[in-house]
């Protein structure tokens, strides 16, 4: 299907099913129950899952295929966000032109940065990209404040021109982002028994774009171009000695991955029309590296899993506070309850970084291939067991 | 004998049809029942407290969270009731809000607009919060206020001092109890004139975001009206921790007053740097060099230690105030946590009470009804004397305190002394004042 091999088609279908049914899958616990704390099926977080999924897929095209570790990818995300918000301010609240512009601008930006940074490889390349990203961050934060509005972040106001739309709605508020009239924030609530599922237009737009981005990434992985990028990863020097100029390939990969980041930034701004400089900070660049490594660098689905994993921790674990803990452990005797809460306390709330850090360490040490390797091992273990059983049942009658 | 022949396909089909049939009516009820976002239908109502737990304002955030917990306890009839007994409005009975038990969720803004909005969104979309409060930075407050306006819930701003929050970025669903930069300047100017005369040269160091900008603008305008000259204004990044490179040029600028438009950890560091450079012992233009910190808090004074002695600034509230409301609040806060509350804690506590009271008076959680109950509301007994929630811009007007770092503190909390209480009339401005112009409230949005 779509010019893909059978295995890749299955993978694409799995991702499609996962994203389209995410409102159900991510909301396994009834709304009123104590475990509802762990539900992730609300629009904002689901949007983040897929948007950062796109970001990580793009990063993986560069890092997973060519092995070039960019430490400044957040700059493209930020540039994308700013372009999208400016489009909302100047042109119209339709998300389509905003997303297009953010992809184009971040692509150009990536071309310039990539052209310079790719003159070096290895650690020097990483440092160069990091430097460029920090420069962009500082520019956005304090130098280019007329364009970026500094620390406050670029926001929509009632007196924006919006040439192809209204500056303000009839009842005096800022119009909302839409796709030809479909409001991004409109959510359809479906209550089934104790469950409450939310279907958000913005999320489904992001999900469809994620599928397209995923499909494109499969095609790139399987194409001759992808093969060339893999060759760069395995031994660039040898490639150069054969008389082949690898630079156009790496630059193309860099620009494509920058455009993916810009797309993610544009989508972020479309879901929530605000762009802040902190989106470009080095911590944000580091986050996408973590996502890719955690999920499995160089695999197709790994980065998406990693993105979901990190965003889940950031949004769900950081919101557990001591009150919630006391609620969970209230069945224990008083002294013991306080003790357990005291032990768990550093790992939740603002301590979510600690929990994530420990999990990251465990994954890197025991599953160097990331979550994907974990999945493969479980799969192999189940299959292995079955095979073991089968061979036993086979040998038994022979005795 | 009957034979039941159930095929897998048939079972799936019937199951799907039956499921859709069961789900269909509930879709309509869920859609039509809610007249506004997160209408609380059960026996509880959820409030969202979004405060910085990490970053330069983390101390303030922690204190705000304590105040919120205390307020919820008092609303639910626990503890000694705090300011409920001194509050001029008696609509709250200590049985929650409109008989619903108050519950709350918390989140970390990280003092970043992005993170703050994500956290507020999850409170609204996932936890069903009907009101969002908190924030220790104007950048965050402005961002979250905009979000609440779009989502259709009430935003009760916490510690935000920028003119923009109720100026050019004001929103119909947002309300601010805290004072603002203009009020600080209006209250400080006469005191500065008495102390330092009307012939001074000022040098500003300003935190580079919405609050810093309006703070600088306000102080500059007020001091220049006195006859002072502004030598230079320099913006510093919010994330900066070392200000030595910004302090050094002050020495050679010919200025004799340094105005630090910094707050929280920023101010602690910049003031410490300034004192280390010996600015306070210098004599410039035949006058003693002075430092002014327009927005002051006890937590900052604690952080800066010895360095704050004799330095003037303004504050929204201080725990040493002798009125009934303040004393009641300090007593219940002190009993629960063992130390007096900060101004951030005070404004958050008061905002929660004001919201609950407005709901009780309106008889509804509908944001539009609540907004109407808050607009033009006059009250007393919450620690700042007579206060008005102005309808034009959703800003509270009340007395402002001018304070000074105490020379001989008697305890580790007794760091500031009140120099003057500037009456509300003196800090009141017209809603269309140029420093606040450029924005519109818009109309209230109930969401859904």
Image: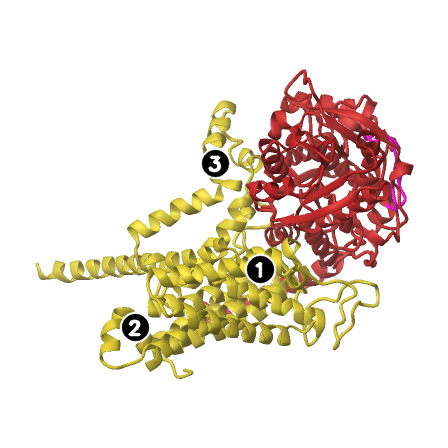
Q: Residue B15 colored magenta?
A: no
Residue plotted at (63% across, 28% down): B307
Q: Do the residues marked 3 and 2 share a common chain?
A: yes
Q: Is residue A380 left or right of residue B312?
A: left
Tell me, yes or no, whether the two marked residues, 3 and 1, touch with CB atoms within 8 Å.
Answer: no
Residue A218: x and y in percent read 39, 75
Spot the residue most to the front.
B286
Task: Label the yellow chain with its letter.
Answer: A
| Mark linked to residue A139 | 1
Label 2 packing within 10 angstroms: few (<14), some (14-19), many (20+):
many
Q: Nearer the viewer, residue B8 or A389?
A: A389
Q: Tag 3, which secondary structure? A: helix
Residue for badge 2: A232
- Region rendered in magenta: B375-390
Q: Do the residues marked 2 and 1 share a common chain?
A: yes
Give whichever of discs 3 and 1 has the lower sequence position: 1
Q: Residue B380 colored magenta?
A: yes
Residue plotted at (29% across, 50% down): A366
Which quadrant of the view contains residue A48?
Answer: bottom right
Image height of A42 relative to A214, above or below: above
Residue plotted at (84% across, 68% down): A170
Residue B322: x and y in percent read 81, 21
Image height of B422 relative to A12, above or below: above
Look at chain B in the picture and name its colour: red
Tell me, yes or no, whether the two marked residues, 2 and 1, touch with CB atoms within 8 Å.
Answer: no
Give whichever of discs 3 and 2 has the lower sequence position: 2
Q: Tag 1, which secondary structure? A: helix
Residue for badge 3: A346
Label 3 packing within 10 angstroms: few (<14), some (14-19), many (20+):
some
């Amino acid at each position: 299907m779509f010019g893909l091999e059978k295995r890749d088609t299955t993978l694409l279908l799995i991702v499609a099913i996962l994203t389209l049914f995410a409102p159900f899958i991510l909301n396994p616990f009834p709304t009123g129950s104590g475990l509802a704390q762990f539900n992730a099926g609300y629009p904002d977080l689901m949007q983040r899952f897929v948007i950062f999924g796109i970001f990580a897929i793009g990063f993986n095209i560069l890092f997973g295929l060519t092995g070039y570790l960019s430490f400044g990818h957040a700059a493209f995300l930020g540039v994308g966000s700013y372009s999208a918000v400016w489009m909302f301010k100047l042109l119209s609240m339709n998300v389509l032109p905003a997303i297009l512009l953010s992809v184009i601008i971040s692509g150009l930006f990536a071309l310039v940065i990539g052209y310079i940074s790719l003159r070096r490889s290895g650690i020097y390349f990483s440092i160069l990209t990091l430097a460029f990203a920090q420069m962009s961050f500082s520019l956005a934060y304090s130098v280019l404040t007329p364009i970026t509005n500094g620390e406050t972040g670029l926001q929509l106001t009632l007196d924006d021109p919006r040439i192809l739309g209204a500056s303000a709605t009839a009842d005096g508020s800022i119009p909302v982002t839409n796709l030809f009239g479909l409001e991004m924030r409109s959510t359809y609530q479906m209550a089934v028994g104790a469950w409450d599922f939310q279907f958000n237009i913005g999320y489904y737009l992001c999900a469809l774009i994620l599928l397209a981005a995923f499909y494109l990434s499969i095609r790139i992985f399987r194409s001759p171009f992808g093969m060339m990028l893999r060759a760069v990863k395995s031994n660039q020097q040898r490639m150069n000695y054969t008389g082949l100029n690898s630079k156009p390939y790496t630059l193309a990969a860099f620009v494509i991955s920058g455009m993916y980041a810009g797309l993610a930034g544009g989508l972020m701004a479309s879901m929530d029309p605000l762009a802040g400089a902190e989106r470009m900070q080095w911590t944000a660049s580091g986050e996408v590296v973590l996502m890719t490594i955690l999920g499995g660098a160089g695999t197709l689905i790994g980065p998406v899993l990693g993105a979901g994993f990190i965003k889940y921790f950031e949004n769900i674990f950081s919101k557990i506070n001591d009150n919630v803990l006391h609620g969970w452990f209230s069945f224990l005797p008083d002294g013991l309850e306080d003790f357990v809460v005291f032990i768990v306390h550093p790992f939740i709330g603002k301590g979510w970084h600690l929990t994530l850090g420990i999990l990251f360490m465990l994954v890197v040490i025991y599953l160097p291939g990331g979550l994907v390797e974990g999945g493969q091992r479980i799969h192999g273990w189940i299959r292995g067991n079955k095979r073991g059983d089968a061979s036993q049942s086979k040998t038994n009658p022979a005795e | 004998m009957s034979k039941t022949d159930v095929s897998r396909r048939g079972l799936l089909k019937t199951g799907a049809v039956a499921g859709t049939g069961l789900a269909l009516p509930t879709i309509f009820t869920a859609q039509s029942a809610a007249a506004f976002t997160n209408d609380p239908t059960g026996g509880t109502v959820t409030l969202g407290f979004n405060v910085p737990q990490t970053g330069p304002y983390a101390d303030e955030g922690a204190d705000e969270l304590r105040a919120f917990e205390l307020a919820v306890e008092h609303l639910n009839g626990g503890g000694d009731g705090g300011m409920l007994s001194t509050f001029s409005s008696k609509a709250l009975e200590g049985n929650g809000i409109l008989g619903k038990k108050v519950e709350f969720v918390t989140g970390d803004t990280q003092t970043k607009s992005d993170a703050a909005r994500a956290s507020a969104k999850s409170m609204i979309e996932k936890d069903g919060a009907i009101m969002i409060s908190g924030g220790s930075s104007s950048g965050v407050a402005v961002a979250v206020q905009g979000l609440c306006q779009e989502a259709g819930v009430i935003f009760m701003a916490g510690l935000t001092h920028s003119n923009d929050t109720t100026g050019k970025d004001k929103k119909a669903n947002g309300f601010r109890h805290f004072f603002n930069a203009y009020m600080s300047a209006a209250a400080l100017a006469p005191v500065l004139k008495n102390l330092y005369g009307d012939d001074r040269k000022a040098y500003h160091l300003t935190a580079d975001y919405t609050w810093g900008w309006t703070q600088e603008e306000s102080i500059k305008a007020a001091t220049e009206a006195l006859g002072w000259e502004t030598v230079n204004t320099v913006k510093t990044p919010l994330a900066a921790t070392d200000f030595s490179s910004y302090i050094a040029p002050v020495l050679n600028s010919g200025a004799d007053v340094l105005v630090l438009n910094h707050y929280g950890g920023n101010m602690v560091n910049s003031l410490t740097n300034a004192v280390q450079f010996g600015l306070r012992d210098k004599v410039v233009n035949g006058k003693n060099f002075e430092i002014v910190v327009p927005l002051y808090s006890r937590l900052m004074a604690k952080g800066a230690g010895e360095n704050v002695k004799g330095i003037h600034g303004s504050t929204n509230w201080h725990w040493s105030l002798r009125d009934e409301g303040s004393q009641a609040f300090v007593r219940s806060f002190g009993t629960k946590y063992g130390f007096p509350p900060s101004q951030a804690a005070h404004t958050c506590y008061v905002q929660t009470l004001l919201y609950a009271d407005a709901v009780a008076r309106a008889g509804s959680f509908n944001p539009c009804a609540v907004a109407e109950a808050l607009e033009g509301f006059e009250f007393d007994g919450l620690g700042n004397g007579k206060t008005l929630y102005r309808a034009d811009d959703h800003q509270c007007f009340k007395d402002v305190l001018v304070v000074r770092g105490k020379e001989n503190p008697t305890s580790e909390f007794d760091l500031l002394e009140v120099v003057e209480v500037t009456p509300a009339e003196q800090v009141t401005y017209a809603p269309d004042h140029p420093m606040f112009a450029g924005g519109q409230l818009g109309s209230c949005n109930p969401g859904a």
